[in-house]
Each structure stands twice: as C-alpha cells, then as structure tokens.
C-alpha cells in the first residue's frame, strides 16, 4: 500500500512547522538486528499541505555535497492508514539529536572549548557552502544543527531545517526583504532594524550559537517584564551592553566579537573567520 518503499515509519522525533519528524526503519533488513536500527528520519505532511516541504527538498537537493549539511535522500509519497496521501522528505538520521540538546545536557555550563572550536569550524564551513551556492539559511540556531556520530565517538554537526532558506539573487548583493524570517534571539541588528537579511546576518547568528555553546545560553534573552520590542532594541544596540564571560579564551572572545559586530558591513567575513586562530588550527579530518 505504500508503493513498495523499503522503510516503515517509527516513533515521532519532533513536531515541526511544516510537518512531523519521524524515525524510519528498513523494511527488509539484511540481519535481524538491523531491523531495530533507524536508518533515516522522515518529515511527513499531508500532500495537500506539503508545498513548503517540497520547497525545502529543492534546497536540500541543491546543497547535497557538504559533510556539514544534513543529507537528504529524496522524497516519497505514501498512503496513510486512513487513505491520506502523505508527502515524505527522507533525511539522514541524526541520532545525536540537536546541538540545543547537547548544550542542554551540559547543564547550563556550556561545552568544553575544544568542542566549541570543532563545532564552530564545521558549522562555519556549512554556512560557507550554503552561501557559495547562493542561499541564505535564515534560521541558524542550535535546534537546527543536528549531530551525527562519527566513527571516532564524536559528533559531526550538520546544518538542517532549510524550511526558511532562500535563494539570493546574484545581481543583488543584499537582500531587502519584506518577509524576514527566523527566530528573534538569533537575528542580527540590520534584520531587526532595516529588514536586511543577508549572508553577514548569518555570521551574527553563528556568533550567537558560539556564545551559547560556550555559556549554555544565547547572548540575548527575554528579561522578565520586557516586551519583544525592548528585547529587539537591546539586540540592535549590539555588543556594547553584552558581557562576554571571562572564562572564554582570548581567541574565543575575539572570534565572538568579530561575529557580533553591530554594523554588518564591518562584521568578520567567513574567510576571516576560517583563518581566525580560534578555529584555524582545527583539523577537520580529526572526526
Ligand atoms: P522545524 O522546521 O519545525 O523546526 P526541523 O526540520 O527543524 O523542523 O525538525 C524539528 C526537530 O525534529 C529538530 O529540531 C530535531 O529535534 C528533530 N529532527 C529533525 N530532523 C532530524 C533528523 N534528521 N534526525 C534527528 N532528529 C531530527
Ligand atoms: Mg527547526
Ligand atoms: Mg523547517
């Protein structure tokens, strides 16, 4: 009844904006043992409401060749028990969960600096790949960085959730956009103030993620009795009022300051960040 596809849907992993995320198991495993091992994650939505998910598949298709971007195995339409047509986006399964989970498990203390460096360099390379293919992700945050175990017992961070990603017009270097998207806590001043959402805005989000890996919390959060407008204003004021914790190394602080420069024109570029001493010594093949 499901067009001969070789997988079956397991338990719910998460409920998303555009569909629900499930584990998927092989239908005919080679060994009995393999039967119980999830082989994919699938995001499923009724076909009638799957246009966003289909767009997300297009983005995944165009970004299929980077070790720091979640892999997509394509799409499949199935029929549910009650006869509904269901659209499924098949994805590499990240059994390590999300970077947000990992940070939460640290008990609010943050991750060891060497891990922060490794994850930062990988995420940076993922962002570089996205931008060099003329996309902006627009929703970079720890919940959207998935962790896939590497052979050596570490996790490889992979950027996922391209539901808000957008193609950047080649002729326009900047993207003025009436439909800004994403989560306020990771949004750059130029996005909050001028509706500008461009590649440099993703460097800001990276800075927020790095800060959160270091400290367990994003740099800006809603204070009690504060309105969203007041929070946005605080973020837009930039680094001036933000204290970078003293436990972070000199290189780490400098890297963070470079990402969180208020004026996007003076923010560090990806190239500058890849060559920055905080991450330049990290060997990607160490995973
Ligand atoms: P949304 O657009 O609603 O945020 P996501 O694609 O980010 O949807 O997925 C929602 C959540 O489901 C993620 O934050 C993560 O917890 C889980 N998830 C999504 N994809 C995977 C995957 N490939 N492997 C493991 N968990 C996943
Ligand atoms: Mg998400
Ligand atoms: Mg999404």
Image (cartoon, helix red, strand yellow):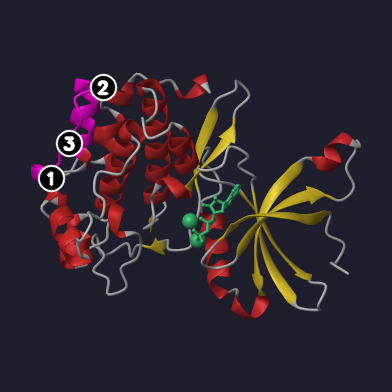
Residue at the spot 30% in from the left edge and 48% down from the top edge = 205
Residue 196 position (above or below residue 257)? below
Q: Is residue 30 above or below residue 130?
A: above
CA gap, disc 1 to disc 3? 11 Å
Q: Is residue 85 above or below residue 270?
A: below
User: Within the magenta stretch, is there residue 99?
Assistant: no
Q: Nearer the viewer, residue 175 or 7?
A: 7
Q: Which mark is residue 107?
A: none
Which residue is denoted by mark 3 in the rendering?
257
Residue 155 position, x and y percent, is 54, 30
Label 1 or label 3, whichever comes before in sequence order: 3
Q: Nearer the viewer, residue 29 or 72?
A: 29
Residues shaded magenta: 240-258
Q: Secondary structure at mark 3?
A: helix
* Quadrant in which residue 182 is drawn: bottom left
Image position, residue 35 (x, y; %): 85, 42
Cα distance between the residues tagged 1 and 2: 19 Å
The residue sitting at the front extreme is 225
For the residues labelled 1 and 3, say whether their Cβ atoms are less than 8 Å apart.
Answer: no
Q: What's the mark number on residue 277?
A: 2
Earlier residue among tags 3 and 2: 3
Is the shortest distance between ligand 2 and the CB of mark 2 under 8 Å?
no
Q: Residue at x 43, y 20 (%)?
A: 283
Instruction: Point out residue 110 in the picture as x, y percentages from the top left corner.
Output: 37, 31
What mark, if any, has residue 266 been given in the picture?
1
Q: Residues within 10 Å of mark 2 (few under 14, many from 20)?
A: some
Asked whether residue 251 is drawn in magenta, I would say yes
Across and down, in percent, residue 6 comes to: 84, 54
Secondary structure state at the residue bearing disc 2:
helix
Using residue 194 as the reference point, say whether residue 81 is left or right of it. Answer: right
Residue 157's place in the image compared with 22, above or below, is above
């Amino acid at each position: 009844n499901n067009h001969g596809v070789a997988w079956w849907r397991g338990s719910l992993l998460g409920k998303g904006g555009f569909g629900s995320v499930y584990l998927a198991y092989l239908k005919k495993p080679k060994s009995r043992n393999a039967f119980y091992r999830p082989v994919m994650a699938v995001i499923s939505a009724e076909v009638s409401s799957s246009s966003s998910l289909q767009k997300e598949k297009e983005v995944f298709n165009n970004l299929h060749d980077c070790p720091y971007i979640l892999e997509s195995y394509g799409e499949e339409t199935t029929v549910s028990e009650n006869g509904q047509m269901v659209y499924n986006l098949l994805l590499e399964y990240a059994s390590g969960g999300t970077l947000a989970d990992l940070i939460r498990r640290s008990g609010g203390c943050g991750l060891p600096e060497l891990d922060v460096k490794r994850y930062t360099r990988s995420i940076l390379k993922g962002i570089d790949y996205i931008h060099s293919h003329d996309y902006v992700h627009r929703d970079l945050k720890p919940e959207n960085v998935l962790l896939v175990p590497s052979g050596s017992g570490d996790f490889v961070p992979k950027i996922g959730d391209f539901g808000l990603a957008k193609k950047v017009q080649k002729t326009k270097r900047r993207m003025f956009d009436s439909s800004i998207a994403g989560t306020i806590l990771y949004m750059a001043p130029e996005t909050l103030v001028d509706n500008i959402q461009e590649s440099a805005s993703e460097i800001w989000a990276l800075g927020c993620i790095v800060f959160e890996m270091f400290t367990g919390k994003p740099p800006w959060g809603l204070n009690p009795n504060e309105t969203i407008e007041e929070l946005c204003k605080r973020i837009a004021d930039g680094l001036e009022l933000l204290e970078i914790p003293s436990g972070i190394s000199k290189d780490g602080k400098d890297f963070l300051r470079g990402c969180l420069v208020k004026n996007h024109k003076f923010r560090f570029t990806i190239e500058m960040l890849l060559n920055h001493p905080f991450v330049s010594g990290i060997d990607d093949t160490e995973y």
